[in-house]
Image: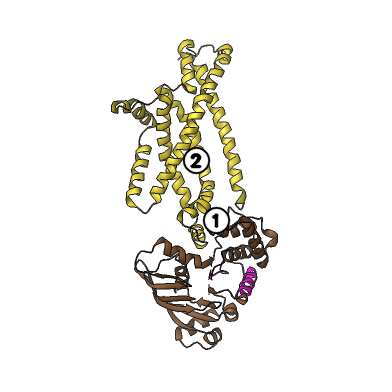
Chain colours: A brown, B yellow
Amino acid sequence: MLSVQDLHKSFGDHHVLKGVHFSLDKGKVLVIIGPSGSGKTTVLRSLNLLEIPDDGSLKIGDAHVAFGKKLSKKAVKQIRQKSAMVFQGYNLFPHRTVLENVIEGPVQVQKKGKQEAIQKAKELLEKVGLSEHIHKYPHQLSGGQQQRVGIARALAIEPELILFDEPTSALDPELVGEVLKVMKSLANEGWTMIIVTHELKFAEEVADEVIFMDQGAIIEKGQPSLLFNHPEQERTKQFLSRIR
Amino acid sequence: MFIGNITIDWDLAAKSFMPILMGGLKYTLPLAIASFIIGLVIAFVMAMCRLSSIKLLQWIARIYISIIRGTPLLVQLSIVYFGLPDLGINISPIYGAIIALSLNVGGYAAEVIRASILSVPKGQWEAGYTIGMGYFQTLRRVIIPQAMRVSIPPLSNTFISLVKDTSLASTITVTELFRRAQEITATSYNFLLLYCEAAFIYWIFCFILSIIQNIIEERLDRYVAK
């Protein structure tokens, strides 16, 4: 369903991604862990072209791009339509209500009927536990609630793949649980997800595969129970011992 | 210095009030509104050029803004109204005033609009892109509504300044508010009274506009955390 080949990316002299390969099957959950600056967020952002890699290729479903030359608008659009992103800082539209945030993509981009989109949005907001807040503005909600709106907004465009960029890192500790709970239920429903996170316990519970990255490369990957409990690489061991 | 007994000619004040006010309503305000609207369109285009990745467009906008901000409005008005006829382009006073004032607003407001677009966090662009929007759709649906809130106070100030700057159109014979007052002084010689009256009417206009500004700001602030 997803295939990433030999991604390279530099910011100026800084070589951030040094040939990253991986693939993911439909309905699977991949968690990427690693120290800050390891390139994990850059990988995630490359998957919906918020960063354009310098080299390599990317295939999501039936959309395919090769990097290293100028991308056509059409190719960018095709790849972006496959995925949705949940941001660390939520990035909700502050001038729109919760409901308007969720229907923005379906109505404005996918040109669905407004009534149909509202109906669907209400179902999604119920799923993330926000039925009572649909007419509020984002600033009237807690961080955990805002992030759940972010998740509903991502689901609303019915992506083949959902990308989570440290979705709980900006939250107060007591609000982390409510967001993870929603993400766990999505994993159980069979959504294909890639999650960058520091929540190792959560990763162990939901991930089908875990990737450990350091200094722009994948150091180790495997099933969560194996990677967390019996890491093979020295750097993985060091990282896990520091974070636990 | 001699300060004589000041007697206010209330009769003249009353008789001249309506003609001066009408100059304001018939010329000053329409002139300001038309120039502001056209000026905002120019400003938006210039702001987009400044933000463009195309170097040529950036430079066109930079030069335009620099010229407008670096030359007096009175000189700009004179070039349009007195200068262009040398090239065979004759423009009526009112259109000359609208052209010069619009170009002027375009130069000043371009920087306001550019700054307000830049003030919207990058994450908002990214949120637009990740739900499938392109550049212009994100700009229209996500960025401009938020940039507007930031730009309302400085743009309101631009408009209020513009209302006062329309008095310069009197120099190219537009019979706006100040020109009316001048015309009446030509026969009555009561400069202090009539110019104070004109000043009072400008102040009333600007006072009402600042109230409208506050109302708009409050409306746009409704989705912002206090």
Label tally: 2
Report, in whole angstroms, how far the alpha carbon at label 2 lies from the one at label 1.
29 Å
Disc 2 element = helix
Identify the residue under disc 2: B155
Disc 1 element = helix
Quarter holding residue A134? bottom right
Position of the N terminus of chain B, as image quadrant, is: top left
Quarter holding residue A216? bottom left
Give the answer, above or below, for where A133 lies relative to B161.
Answer: below
- In percent of width and height, residue A152 lies at 61, 64
Task: Say whether mark 1 and mark 2 are on the same chain.
Answer: no
- Of marks 2 and 1, the one in the foreground: 1
The residue depicted at 42 percent of the width and 32 percent of the height is B101
The residue depicted at 62 percent of the width and 77 percent of the height is A188
Which is more toward the observer, B61 or A29?
A: A29
Magenta span of residues: A158-186
Output the chain of dot 1.
A
| Residue A173 visible to the viewer | yes
